[in-house]
Image: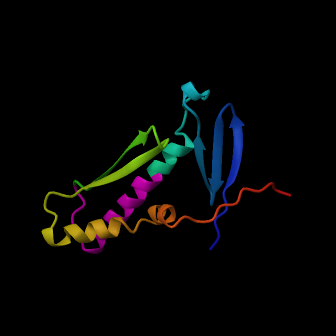
Amino acid sequence: MQKKIAVSFPGGKKVDASFEGWTIHTDQSVKNGGDNTAPNPFDLFFASLAACAGFYALEFCQARELSTEGLAVQLDAARDPAKKLFTPIRIAITLPQDFPDKYRKAILKTANLCTVKKHIINTPEFEVVLAD
């Protein structure tokens, strides 16, 4: 399987990423010269992490026919001024009220299988090249 994403520039500081019939619109904050009409690409990175962990938690519950009412995921991150990176990144899962104790460790283990997180931990090779 191969992923291809085409990027276009509709104006101002806006950048669109299109793939498989979808277009993700991004912009920058007014502070950074944008119009603040869409999330910036880095915010989408965090949203991707949170949504991925949420998907795995949801899938865990659905596979066991457990209620998902009250299931929630919250990502929190603060920028470390010394490192100039966001660390730590904390993903907290709120479980449904009647969630069985016997599955508490298992749902955490499952959420940790998030594919987005795996790509951060197992750093892929990157190449930035000029197109022919």
Q: What is the span of residues highlighted in magenta in the rendered image?
A: 48-69
Q: Quadrant of residue 30?
A: top right
Q: Quadrant of residue 16?
A: top right
Q: Is residue 69 visible?
A: yes
Q: Is residue 59 visible?
A: no
Residue drawn at x 19%, y 58% as measured from the top left: 96
Q: Along the horizontal axis of the image, is 61 left or right of 83?
A: left
Q: Along the horizontal axis of the image, is 30 left or right of 116?
A: right
Coordinates of residue 39 in the picture (x, y in percent): 52, 39
* Residue closer to the observer: 81 or 4: 81
> What colouring style does the render use?
rainbow
Residue drawn at x 38%, y 50% as measured from the top left: 89
Above or below residue 12? Residue 128 is: below
For the C terminus, the quadrant is: bottom right
Coordinates of residue 10 in the picture (x, y in percent): 70, 38
- Which SS type dominates the magenta stretch? helix
Residue drawn at x 48%, y 44% as measured from the top left: 83
Q: Along the horizontal axis of the image, is 68 left or right of 30?
A: left
Residue drawn at x 50%, y 47% as measured from the top left: 44
Q: Along the horizontal axis of the image, is 18 left or right of 36?
A: right
Coordinates of residue 69 in the picture (x, y in percent): 22, 56
Above or below residue 3? Residue 76 is: above
Coordinates of residue 46 in the picture (x, y in percent): 45, 49
For the N terminus, the quadrant is: bottom right
